[in-house]
Amino acid sequence: MKKNLLLVLLFIAIIFFGRILPHPYNFTPLIAIALLSGHTLPNKFLAIFAPLFGFWLSDLVINNIVYAGYYSNFTIFSSGMIWSYGAILIIALFGKSFINKISSSKIVLASLSGSTIFYLISNFGVWALSPMYAKTVLGLIQCYTLALPFYATSLMGDLLYCSLLFGAYQLVISNNPNFLISKSKT
């Protein structure tokens, strides 16, 4: 349990700092951590909680400090978050069911799938909630088309972060099961 708690805290910190530190749009470790938490944490609640809580904490900073001018009050939850957070929930569950054993091909496929799931669901939410797009098939196509540059950076970031994080997990934690657990000398 101690190892799981340390992993949850590590995952939350990686998401938080990966999103608030300067980076290209959508080039963050969020999808990679959602997949990795799904794979590594045996408790389904923790596997979902870690990426969602890290996402929410970083949103608090981003919405209330970085983009404070766009909101009239302190923002705890934004209007479209249900779509983005729902996508992360699905990605974490996908990581739990799809990545039963770490392999290069599974990590690449999971990364590409995670990016695509997030792109499709979050941009559907943008189309559904934004007055910027006509509520027609053409409006939806326009929304997805204008989001393609963000999807491209998401694909690159997700592939990089999945490679790094799953690789680090495989090298350090999988090969040393007691790595995160300190042993007291008696």
Image (cartoon, rainbow, N blue to C red):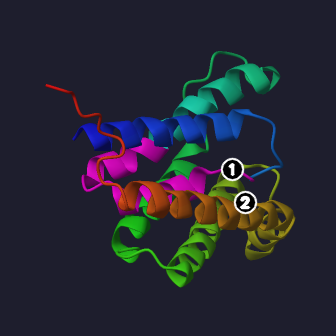
Frontmost residue, 117 versus 133: 117
Where residue 82 appears, as percent x and y from the top left, is 52, 47
Quarter of the figure with residue 138: bottom right
Residue at 72% over, 67% down = 155
> As drawn, is 44 to the left or to the right of 131?
left
Tell me whether the residue at label 2 lies in contact with that at label 1, contact meaning CB atoms closer than 8 angstroms: yes
Where residue 101 appears, as percent x and y from the top left, is 37, 76
Where residue 67 appears, as percent x and y from the top left, is 78, 27
How far separated are the C-alphas under marks 2 and 1?
Answer: 6 Å
Frontmost residue, 77 versus 132: 77
Where residue 23 appears, as percent x and y from the top left, is 81, 44
Please give the range of residues in magenta.
27-51
Secondary structure state at the residue bearing disc 2: helix
Q: Residues within 10 Å of mark 2 (few under 14, many from 20)?
A: many
User: Would residue 183 be seen by someone viewing this image from the given angle?
Assistant: yes
Quarter of the figure with residue 142: bottom right
The quarter of the picture where the C terminus appears is: top left
Residue at 78% over, 25% down = 66
At label 1, the amino acid type is: Thr
The dominant secondary structure in magenta is helix
Q: How crowded is mark 1: few (under 14 residues within 10 Å), some or many (20 or more)?
A: many
Q: Does the magenta stretch include residue 53?
A: no
> Where is mark 1, residue-wise?
28
> Where is mark 2, residue-wise?
157
